[in-house]
Image (cartoon, rainbow, N blue to C red):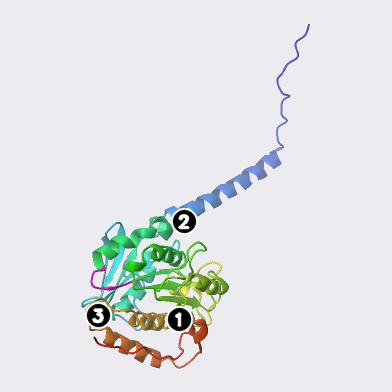
Amino acid sequence: MTRQSSRPPPRLPLPPRVRFWLGLLLALVLGYLIALVQGAVVRPPLVIGQDAVPPSGPVQGVTSTLENQGGAFLDIKPGGAATTLLVYYPGGLVRPQAYEWLGRALAADGVQTVIPVFPLDLAVTGINRADALIRKFGAGKTVVIAGHSLGGAMAAQYARGHRDQLSGMILMGAYPAGNVNLKESRLPVLSLLAEQDGVAEPADVRDGLNRLPASAQLTVIPGAVHSFFGRYGAQRGDGLPTVTRAAAEAGILRAVRAFLATLPPPSGDAGHCARTSTASAVRSAMTSGHERVGAHERVAGAGGTSAACVMA
């Protein structure tokens, strides 16, 4: 009796041309994946002072140093005493030095800006990094959390669980994630929207107001794009700007300065009136654009009035 073999029949070899094209396709896929991984893992060097001069020119006495407190961070200090601490979360895959220009400009107003260095430059890897920085520098200061794009979403998530530690929040081209609701909070919030943003869709930024306090103010930066909040070059998928970067940065600074000056001062701060007067002057100088008070929306450049300053 003959036993039949259970071995499968031999496979026919692929034609050389098919093997060539399959190999080429596999090489292309692997190359693309390697490029993606390298872009996330191999980050550009952190260069302090790289393209960091504010639109109005250098600010005297400002220092920028790389420090470590619960992880590396960029520390931008004014020449004199700081009255405000701004903890800034960068956008996804954006190096911290891209926002150094902002910290240097605000230093003229007594703001100390600290920008954490996140693993892979992704704020989602360390949402609570602000804790150590606030403990280190926040005493006696008005503490504000801020962020751009993904960093803004993570700043909002941090604010949800740390409202008592914060005096305000600034979102730049960002909005809270769907599961983050700050609507019942009394935290002052400024949301900045680049008019030509192609990354953070304007409709999504406006919809994000539904998860922010009713008092949140949305300010539109006319003609600006997503990448104008930081100095890291053009961004894929972004819109086309209709203004210069310098003009957009000037609008961002006006809006941020006016917002910071309205925040409650730290206990015993007699300098609040001076900062509020400065904000009033800034807003009075804004003569173009329009404001829709009911929707808490302002176009950067729109006029406004400041709240009265009452000395106790």
Where is residue 204? Give x, y as percent.
Answer: 55, 70
Per the image, the residue denoted by label 1 is 248
Per the image, the residue denoted by label 3 is 60
Q: Could you tell me the amino acid type at mark 2?
A: Gly
State which quadrant residue 46 falls in. Answer: bottom left
Work out whether residue 67 can be spotted: yes
Q: Residue at x 58, y 49 (%)?
A: 29
Per the image, the residue denoted by label 2 is 39
Tell which circle, 1 or 3, labels the residue nearer the N-terminal end: 3
Q: Nearer the viewer, residue 71 or 209?
A: 209
Q: Could you tell me the amino acid type at mark 1?
A: Ala
Q: Quadrant of the C terminus?
A: bottom left
Q: Could you tell me the amino acid type at mark 3?
A: Gln
Q: Nearer the viewer, residue 239 or 306?
A: 306
Report how far apart the C-alphas of labels 1 and 3 lie in the structure: 23 Å
Where is residue 248? Give x, y as percent.
Answer: 45, 81
Q: Nearer the viewer, residue 197 or 12?
A: 197
Tell which circle, 1 or 2, labels the residue nearer the N-terminal end: 2
**Position of residue 26 in the picture relative to residue 208 (left or right):** right
**Range of residues picked out in magenta:** 138-143
Number of numbered discs present?
A: 3
Q: Nearer the viewer, residue 7 or 123?
A: 123
Q: Quadrant of the N terminus?
A: top right
Where is residue 215? Give x, y as percent.
Answer: 45, 78
